[in-house]
């Protein structure tokens, strides 16, 4: 049997995409709340358009999302029914520190999560908690400019210390930043950054990167001090870049593009900035804001495991002006002619998961955790509200099959697997509800209409069987 008996099967969500209750329980406003659905979403998430409040022209899907704020017990019961061993979720920073720079936390916010964790414990579900999943308090953006400011490290440290202390014994698995490399591609989501006129954008992004990496290492240190049982993971938006063909220029280009993302994990897992990155920054006259003691903190506090999201592989071509491009979670890629694509144009490559896992394991020699994988698709319920999502089952089965090979044939150590959006939720990239990933259908459309009723899809029973058979029965 490839998977160990305590293999962590489960599903993943993020507060901003499912919780809603944006103004309840003393919660403050966050960047993710003010990101609308529609054409302005992209310029806003990439930090090109300043938009830090609500207006009447836009619809804001995160405000209510799927209202997990009021439905979490029912949702956890459904996860338990599928046999989840783990549930990956994130904390809304502004529920705990509404503005972000307070000294004392908001008790109501802490209580909210404590109850969720206690219920998980009762159900035998191990929480896997992302400390920040694209969220940043608006106050910290307005007052300090987001992660370009070193003060953010302090605020994050306060958040980390508060939650590790309060949830000691209830949570053992933590991820410091969701898809940390996303800050280079969607800086508003990844780092609360809105670019100023004439600003050196690359410089700002690496400034923020250093601050997040430092904050991640400090959080790792505190987590281990507070509870040696804590396991901390980094989290990468992964997906191997393949060379377009065997032309050496394309091979080099693929290596370069892989490194542009992997350097984050190199720091978090090996504890130092790799030479290739330092050389690149030097060439581009970008300075990292390294202060005395920073490098020691990075070196001494590396992560326990490597987690990542995987939706697709990518393709790199040295001279790609004329190349056909395919969509993906913000990462541009040359189209791979050997692969099919989802309705949103994301190419489907189960073998790429095995390849990506092997690269990560070879490079870091630490256990891996696949914390996001799934198919965003349009689901059409029948007259009873049932969705026969065979396409989703096929996607997941093919990926699990390859993941199994990585473990069984290649010997990769793997802690667990959580599918993305185990219950339908708001899409991070587009703000749509109609881009569904779940085993559970939620009656809600792209503009907030619907009863919010939860209905298991065909994949619900399928996944239950997968978990019960520990991945044998696909
Ligand atoms: C990842 C994010 C998730 C999630 C997923 C699917 O990048 O970590 O938050 O949403 O991608 O992307 P989308 O929602 O755009 O389909």
Image: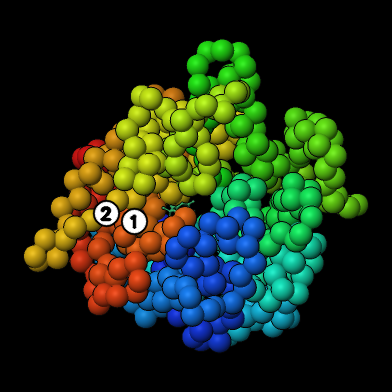
Asked whether residue 316 is in view, the answer is yes
For image coordinates 72% across by 73% down, the residue present is 142
Front residue of 414/67: it is 67
- Tell me where residue 394 sits by quadrant: top left
Cβ of mark 1 under 8 Å from ligand 1: the answer is yes
* Residue marked by disc 1: 435
- Is the CB of the residue bearing disc 2 within 8 angstroms of ligand 1? no
Give the SS element for disc 1: loop
Badge 2: how crowded within 10 Å, few (<14), some, or many (20+)? some
Labels 1 and 2 touching (C-beta < 8 A) = yes
Q: Hey, which quadrant is residue 402 in on the image?
A: top left
Q: Which mark is residue 378?
A: 2
Under circle 2, the secondary element is loop
Left/right of residue 312 with respect to residue 162 in the rendered view:
left
Residue at position x 38%, y 29% in the image: 351
Residue farthest along the left direction in this orientation: 383
- Residue at the image position 37 percent from the left and 76 percent from the top: 67
Quadrant of the frame with the C terminus: top left
The answer to which of marks 1 and 2 sits earlier in the sequence is 2
């Amino acid at each position: 049997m490839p998977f160990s008996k305590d293999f962590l099967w489960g599903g993943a969500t993020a507060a901003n995409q499912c919780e809603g209750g944006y103004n309840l329980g003393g919660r403050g406003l966050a960047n993710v709340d003010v990101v609308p659905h529609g054409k302005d979403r992209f310029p806003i998430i990439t930090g090109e358009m300043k938009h830090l409040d609500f207006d009447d022209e836009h619809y804001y899907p995160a405000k209510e999302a799927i209202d997990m704020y009021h439905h979490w017990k029912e949702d956890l019961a459904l996860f338990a029914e599928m046999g989840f061993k783990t549930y990956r979720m994130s904390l809304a920073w502004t529920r705990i520190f509404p503005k972000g720079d307070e000294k004392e936390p908001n008790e109501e916010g802490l209580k909210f999560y404590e109850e969720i964790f206690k219920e998980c414990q009762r159900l035998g579900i191990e929480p896997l908690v992302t400390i920040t999943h694209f969220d940043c308090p608006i106050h910290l953006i307005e007052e300090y400019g987001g992660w370009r400011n070193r003060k953010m490290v302090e605020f994050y440290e306060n958040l980390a210390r508060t939650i590790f202390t309060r949830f000691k014994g209830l949570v053992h698995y933590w991820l410091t930043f969701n898809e940390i490399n996303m800050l280079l591609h969607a800086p508003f989501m990844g780092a609360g950054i809105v670019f100023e006129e004439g600003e050196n954008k690359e410089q700002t992004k690496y400034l923020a990167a250093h601050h997040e990496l430092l904050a991640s290492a400090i959080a790792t240190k505190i987590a281990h001090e507070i509870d040696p049982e804590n396991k901390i993971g980094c989290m990468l938006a992964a997906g191997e870049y393949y060379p377009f063909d065997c032309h050496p220029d394309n091979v080099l280009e693929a290596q370069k593009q892989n490194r542009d993302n992997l350097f984050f994990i190199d720091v978090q897992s090996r504890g130092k900035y790799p030479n290739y990155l330092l050389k690149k920054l030097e060439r581009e006259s970008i300075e990292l804001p390294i202060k005395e003691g920073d490098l020691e903190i990075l070196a001494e506090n590396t992560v326990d495991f490597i987690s990542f999201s995987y939706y697709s592989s990518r393709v790199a071509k040295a001279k790609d002006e004329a190349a056909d491009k395919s969509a993906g979670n913000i990462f541009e890629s040359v189209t791979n002619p050997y692969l099919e694509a989802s309705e949103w144009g994301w190419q489907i490559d189960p073998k790429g998961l095995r390849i990506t896992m092997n690269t990560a394991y070879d490079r870091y020699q630490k256990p891996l955790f696949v914390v996001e994988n799934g198919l965003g698709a349009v689901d059409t319920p029948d007259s009873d509200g049932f969705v026969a999502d065979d396409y989703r089952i096929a996607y997941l089965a093919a990926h699990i099959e390859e993941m199994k090979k990585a473990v069984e044939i290649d010997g990769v150590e793997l802690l667990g697997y959580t599918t993305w959006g185990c219950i339908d939720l708001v899409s991070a990239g587009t703000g749509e509800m109609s881009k569904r990933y779940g085993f559970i259908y939620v009656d809600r459309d792209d503009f907030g209409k619907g009863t919010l009723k939860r209905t298991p899809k065909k994949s619900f029973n399928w996944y239950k069987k997968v978990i019960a058979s520990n991945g044998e029965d696909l």
